């Protein structure tokens, strides 16, 4: 009897695999844009704006944005506008701590089993990133860096780990928007890219310990840099608010005197 029931269960048809839809492609493009600093923290976006940017109708954009709000990568406001989240200091620290742990582990796992084809692809991505730095072209740098790291994470053959890392990048990616507009970014990135080179060498050598150490060190240095820019950005916002308040007070006093 148990053999028959097992056989019946095994013979049940499975649900068909869902083909990629237009909303899936829109989601992928928006997620990549969020991860690589294409959106400013605190900025508001609309369905129509995004539909124009990805050249599609509102419906697939609405589905993609809904998925991103469930991942806390976007915030749906009461007035139905959509906002790029602003991270508090505690949220920044918590998310970054997780990035160090998970991305270090993914690099260590990948170093043990990465195929030679992936190592060759990493070599090309590293060259393209370095070339973009020399050309002082920031957008390709963030895009190529994303491809470089996720090529490594994918090589870990651990989809659940990669999924967790993607969620963390969705939350922290917009932090690059302000930092990359700074005058000091080129010098920092040139210095920081040495970790990418050493990480690549660890992948080529199949050295998990060095791979983990380089990615963790890279992320810790990046966290310090981003904290500095977050502080400056916060000071600029507070200064702008103070100036506006002062202007309003002066205007009110002038009206009273008149």
Image (spheres, rainbow, N blue to C red):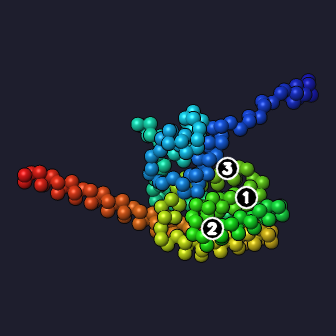
State the residue position of label 1: 151
x then y, percent, for residue 157 = 78, 54
Q: Residues within 10 Å of mark 3 (few under 14, many from 20)?
A: few
Q: Is residue 62 above or below residue 106?
A: above
The tag earlier along the polypeptide, 1 or 3, is: 1
Q: Earlier in the sequence, mark 3 or mark 2?
A: 2
Which is more toward the observer, 156 or 191? 191
Q: Please identify the quarter of the rendering in which residue 219 is found.
A: bottom right
Left-right relation of 73 to 89: right
Q: Could you classify mark 1 by the number of other residues whose Cα lies within 10 Å: few (under 14), some (14-19), or many (20 or more)?
A: some
Q: Is residue 29 above or below residue 228?
A: above
Residue picked out by circle 2: 132
| Dot in front, 1 or 2 | 2
Does residue 218 appear in the picture of this structure?
A: no
Residue 141, x across and y down, in percent: 61, 64
Give the secondary structure at mark 2: helix
Q: Residue at x 63, y 72 (%)?
A: 193
Q: Position of residue 49 (x, y in %)?
A: 50, 42
Point 55% across, 75% down: residue: 187
The residue pinned by badge 3 equals: 163
Task: State yes or no: discs 3 and 2 in contact (Cβ < 8 Å).
Answer: no
């Amino acid at each position: 009897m148990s053999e028959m029931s097992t056989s019946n269960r095994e013979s049940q048809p499975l649900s068909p695999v869902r083909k990629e839809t237009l909303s899936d492609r829109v989601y992928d493009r928006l997620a990549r844009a969020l991860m690589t600093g294409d959106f400013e923290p605190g900025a508001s976006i609309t369905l129509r704006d995004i539909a124009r940017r990805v050249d599609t109708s509102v419906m697939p954009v609405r589905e993609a944005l809904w998925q991103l709000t469930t991942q806390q990568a976007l915030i749906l406001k009461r007035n139905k506008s959509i906002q790029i989240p602003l991270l508090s200091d505690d949220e920044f620290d918590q998310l970054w701590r997780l990035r160090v742990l998970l991305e270090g582990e993914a690099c260590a796992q990948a170093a043990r089993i990465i195929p030679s084809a992936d190592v060759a692809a990493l070599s090309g991505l590293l060259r393209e990133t370095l070339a973009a730095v020399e050309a002082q072209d920031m957008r390709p740098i963030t895009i190529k860096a994303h491809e470089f790291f996720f090529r490594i994470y994918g090589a870990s053959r651990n989809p659940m780990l990669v999924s967790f890392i993607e969620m963390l990048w969705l939350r922290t990616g917009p932090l690059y928007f302000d930092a990359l507009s700074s005058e000091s970014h080129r010098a920092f990135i040139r210095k920081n890219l040495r970790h990418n080179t050493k990480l690549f060498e660890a992948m080529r050598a199949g050295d998990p310990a060095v791979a983990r150490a380089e990615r963790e060190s890279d992320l810790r240095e990046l966290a310090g840099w981003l904290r500095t820019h977050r502080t400056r950005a916060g000071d600029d916002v507070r200064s702008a608010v103070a100036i506006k308040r002062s202007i309003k007070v002066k205007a009110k006093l002038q009206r009273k005197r008149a």
